[in-house]
Amino acid sequence: MIRLAICVAALAALVSCTAPTSPVNEPERDLGDFVLGHNIVVAPQLQKGPLSREASKDAWIASMKNAIDARFGRYDGDRTVHFGINLSGYVLAQNGVPLVLSPKSALIITVTAWDDRAGGKFNDEAREFIVLESFRTIGMSSGMTMSSEEQMANLTYNAAKQIETWMYENRACIADNVAADVLAECWKDSATERAERQKQLDELR
């Protein structure tokens, strides 16, 4: 009976864990007049986390750029926004790691959005994102069912989606003549968001 349960879980994992790929089929969000300008991704101090597979900086940069292009290339407004994305750390769960360690894949990035019209940053302080893989099954990790390329595609897809949500939450700030009370709240992190990111970081250590 236990063996059957394991087999069923394994089959479900193989069916469900295909990494998301472009094109993005999810509905567009209301980002106002947003249109993507430069898509700049760097990784000058990219750190590999403990018990992680190896992945090159170039592979990470290419995967992140592709994910941004796929998600944000759908928008055709007239307010050009440039992205500067720094990849700072990653974990790609690998096969063979004891399950008691609960291996998981994750990506840490910081993002700055630039206002082409004003010639400056929208957010003065780079926004940090802790990105987790979208597929996990009890008793298994993506290291058992995904290649490193699939794991990267999964994580960068999720990262681009988080950035899209961030832009949606600040859509009122991507405009001319923003009211002073709205501007005061633009691009701000709440204490709850900061606490949640710290919790995620702690869990990855």
Image (cartoon, helix red, strand yellow):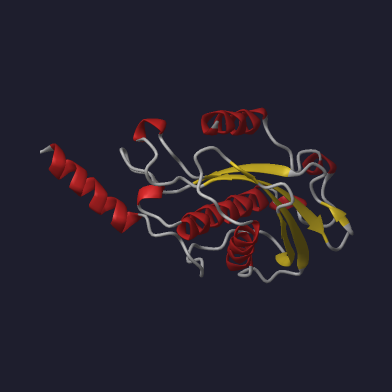
In this rendering, is residue 8 above or below 196?
Answer: below
- The N terminus, quarter of image: top left
Residue name at image x 24 percent, y 53 percent: 11
Tag count: 0
Closest to the observer, 89 or 186: 89
Q: Is residue 24 left or right of residue 86?
A: left
Residue name at image x 29 percent, y 58 percent: 15
Residue name at image x 62 percent, y 55 percent: 164
In this rendering, is residue 127 above or below 37?
Answer: above
Q: Where in the figure is residue 79, as x and y percent of width and height?
A: 77, 65
Residue name at image x 20 percent, y 43 percent: 6
Q: Where in the figure is residue 87, as x and y percent of width and height?
A: 67, 50
Most distant residue in the left direction: 1
Which quarter of the picture shows residue 3?
top left
- The C terminus, quarter of image: top right
Q: Is residue 169 left or right of residue 13?
A: right
Closest to the observer, 155 or 58: 58
Closest to the observer, 66 or 97: 97
Closest to the observer, 99 or 158: 99
Q: Is residue 118 left or right of residue 156?
A: right
Q: Where in the figure is residue 10, as x and y percent of width and height?
A: 25, 49
Most distant residue in the right direction: 119
Which quarter of the picture shows residue 118?
bottom right
